[in-house]
Amino acid sequence: MRESQADMDREIAGMRCRDVLARLTDYVDDDLELETAERMRAHVSACDVCEQFGGVFAELVVRLKGTLPEAAPLPPAVRARLVAQLSNRGVIPPGPAR
């Protein structure tokens, strides 16, 4: 049986499915604030759609991370130019190179 669009965008634990799926990479990378991560865990544990998709996605990311080599650090000058460009385009807040 095919699920309706409404069934695939439920609000559970204060988060909608679309918001959970949009932040899934941040969750898997452990880049979320504690409160947001806890709300995502609560949503996924109660939502069969997100649990199924999120579980498959998370497993894939973990496997990929386990097989890919560690990225080489950028040379400082390249990093500074990249940060400046991202800052100029509003992708990241202005400030010193991280």
Image (tube, grey):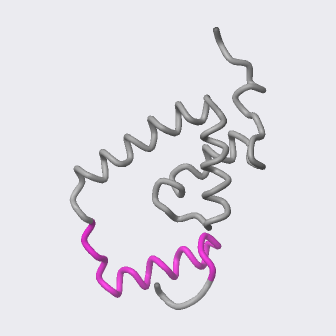
Please tell me whether residue 85 belongs to the stretch shown in magenta. Answer: yes
Q: Nearer the viewer, residue 80 or 59?
A: 59
Q: Residue furthest top?
A: 1
Q: Is residue 63 above or below residue 91?
A: above
Q: From the viewer's perspective, is 81 left or right of 23?
A: left
Q: Which quadrant is the N terminus positioned in?
A: top right
- Looking at the picture, how far across and down is residue 12, in whole percent? 75, 41
Residue 63 image point, x, y percent: 30, 45
47 in relation to 67, above or below:
above
Residue 1 in the figure: left or right of residue 12: left
Q: Quadrant of residue 86?
A: bottom right
Q: Nearer the viewer, residue 75 or 64?
A: 64
In the image: residue 90, left or right of residue 51: right
Residue 49, position in %: x, y? 61, 29
* Magenta region, residue range: 71-93
Quadrant for residue 48, please give it: top right
Q: Residue at x 75, y 34 (%)?
A: 10
Specify whether residue 43 is painted magenta: no
Question: Looking at the image, which is closer to me, 88 or 47?
Answer: 47
Seen at 31% across and 77% down, the residue is 74
Residue depicted at 27% across the width and 66% down the height: 71
